[in-house]
Image: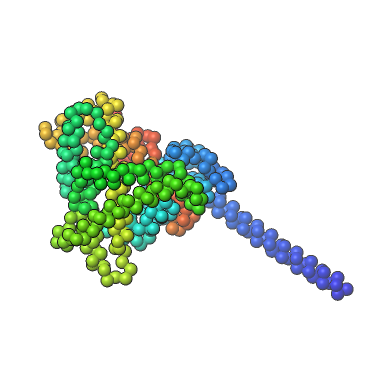
Amino acid sequence: MAIQSLLQYVGSSLLLYLAAGLVALLYFLTSLKKSVCSLPPGPRPLPLIGNLNVVDLKKPFQSLTELSKIYGNVFTVYFGPRKAVVLAGYETIKDALLNHAEEFGERAEIPIFRKMTQGNGIAFSHGELWKTMRRFTLSTLRDFGMGRRTIEIRILEEVNSLIKYFESYHGKPFDTKMILNNAVSNVICSVLFGERFEYDDPVFLTLLKLINENTKLLGSPMVLLYNFYPSLGFLSGASKTVLQNVSELNAFLQKLFQEHKEEFNENNLTGFVDAFLMKQQQESKKPHTMFNNRNLLFSTLDLFAAGTETTSTTVRWGLLLMMKYPEIQRKIQEEMDHVIEPGELPKLEDRKKMPYTDAVIHEIQRFANIVPMGVSRSTPTDVNFQGYVIPKVSLEVSSLHCTDSFQFYLKQTGRKNIKI
């Protein structure tokens, strides 16, 4: 009887534990289902590869554009094991980045950039460091002419040098790639260092080639795969080249920094680097100052690299499209001849008087599509956005690819009845 009672007790206890386990499992599955259901829709992910079977890594923005036609302007996609929420369309991206700026304000953790910068600089830093560097950078760039008449004068001076270089070929063909990189970079260098470089400077040409190579590699399928699967060693070949190039770029910048330190005069600041050095001196006694050498290095490199390749590539697209569509080139020239005095160069104040030229520039930017996916962000908290819940630390990608020629331009400017 005692044994039978014991068996009955053990049996009833097991049933209770089993029932409790089933309840817990059902609760977990229900919670998981709710969590999954609250996510934006998207293609069903496969084990290990996620949705890489439907994403062309050579042109991922095109794949995301096609997926947005199926799943809407807010959808979920898996890059291997990494879950990402994609925002597409002008209104959606504007809503996220303007009306929900704080919720979408964190930079995404991207392995290749983490290795490059260790979280320093402007473009890929986080939290308070990013806010401090961004605030200082914007203020300093304005002090040295960005958005003001001062920077326009520097641009016009560089344009004159560029025109003379073009004329030196006397109408013979030449490659515009490096010279345009150099001209654009010189404008940035004038703000960063207070100096420009000659177009045939071998050290500076090497520097620009390194930036150009890294720009290509960072968007290559192998580096993208490295970002999705950073622990897989066989994918690290391209990423090692990127890091080696960054090391060479750093060595070049360190020499410039040393020169500026030796010639530093707080009463005669020549550019961003000098302003940073002065800030370093002011905060030298603070134990945890953010104005350290690594932030100087990567903030300068961010500004230097980000503007050079993107701007010069856009200008090259402009030259190509003007050659391909000479009738548009003629209309621009006619408008300029009507507004600009003979022998003068166009200025920012002339922009309102040249709506056709302004529209063509916007169309070139849309057509060239230099950074079609923007810079990835992440959500520091769970975010309710357009009826969906985007979970904390979710990778967020903005698909800026626009197929409507003037959608972005017309909504920005309110212009109508302009046709190209």
In this view, the residue in front, 406 or 264, is 264
Question: In which quadrant will I find the N terminus?
Answer: bottom right
Q: Position of residue 76 (x, y in %)?
A: 50, 46
Q: Residue at x 23, y 61 (%)?
A: 277
Question: Which residue is pictured at 18% across the width and 28% down the height?
Answer: 170
Quarter the C terminus occupies: top left
With 106 as the anchor, is 166 left or right in this view?
A: left
User: Position of 330 compared to 121: left or right?
Assistant: left
On the question of residue 274 being in view, the answer is: no
128 in relation to 4, above or below: above
**Number of marks drawn:** 0
Colouring method of the image: rainbow
Residue 12, above or below 393 = below
Q: Residue furthest front?
A: 202
Q: Is residue 58 visible?
A: yes
Find the residue positioned furthest to the left.
342
Q: Image point 23% across, 58% down: which residue?
A: 258
Residue 329 % position (x, y) = 24, 28
In the displayed structure, would residue 386 be above or below residue 289? above
113 lies left or right of 161: right
Looking at this rendering, what residue extends furthest in the top direction? 327
Q: Which of these two is toward me, 264 or 359?
A: 264
User: Of residues 73 and 59, which is closer to you in this image?
Assistant: 59
